[in-house]
Amino acid sequence: MSVLARVLIVGAAVGLATMIAQHVRVRVQRDESGWKQLKPGFLIYFMLFGCASFVVLAGSALITSDPMQPDAQEQNFYALLVLIGFALAGAYPVWIAYGRCVMWKGSMILVRSWTGKERLFLISELVSVQRSEISEDYRLVFQSGETLRFSTNLRGAARFILDIEYYRDSIEHKDQSSQTAT
């Protein structure tokens, strides 16, 4: 298989993955118990499928390489480096998408790790909400000192932040009205 054919196959795979990822983009929905959940978004699927496509490309280059070429060892070495690099880069979107589950309902935030460990946070205990433009993530800091980070590329992240702001504003409004009443 020629290099051009491999590139076309990878391009088609990434294009197909992009179309699937766009199709998956739907609004945040509640489950039967009322919890909303952050789910992988378009960019995360694109990164995941793109890395997988390049791993397949590098793997096929390793498998189908001609050992009789004078620089076959060097080519296989670089193909292996590309394969390992994209496999490691693919671990990041997998971790973001499936390493833990962030859910919220009312003024509660539930974080479930892939090991099954659950942590429950209350929005009333939230100290600060920070957004990083460089790493494209949100950082929530709670009174206990614990930090929750999640990607802005998760589907529902904007809605989650809006809900947090809504509950924080309602808590502040209740505090102000109780102070004026006394």
Image: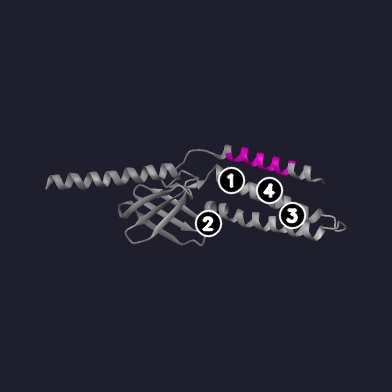
Q: Is residue 67 left or right of residue 76?
A: right
Q: Is residue 182 magenta?
A: no
Q: Which residue is mark 4?
A: 53
Q: Residue at x 64, y 47 (%)?
A: 50
Please report whichever mark, 4 or 1, sits nearer to the chain's N-terminal start: 1
Please report whichever mark, 1 or 3, sits nearer to the chain's N-terminal start: 1
Q: Which residue is mark 1?
A: 45
Q: Is residue 11 magenta?
A: yes
Residue type for callout 2? Gly
Q: CA distance from mark 1 to mark 2?
A: 14 Å
- Percent across and percent down for residue 106 are 35, 47
Check the image and report above or below for 127 versus 21: below
| Mark carried by residue 57 | none
Residue type for callout 4? Ser
Residue type for callout 3? Gly
Under tag 1, what secondary structure? helix
Please report whichever mark, 3 or 2, sits nearer to the chain's N-terminal start: 3
18, 105: nearer the viewer: 18
- How are the residues colored? one colour
Q: CA distance from mark 4 to mark 1?
A: 12 Å
- Percent across and percent down for residue 35 are 42, 47
- Percent across and percent down for residue 134 are 48, 49
Residue type for callout 1? Tyr
Which range of residues does the magenta coloring cover? 8-21
**Based on the displayed image, in which of its 4 quarters is residue 4 positioned?**
top right
Under tag 4, what secondary structure? helix
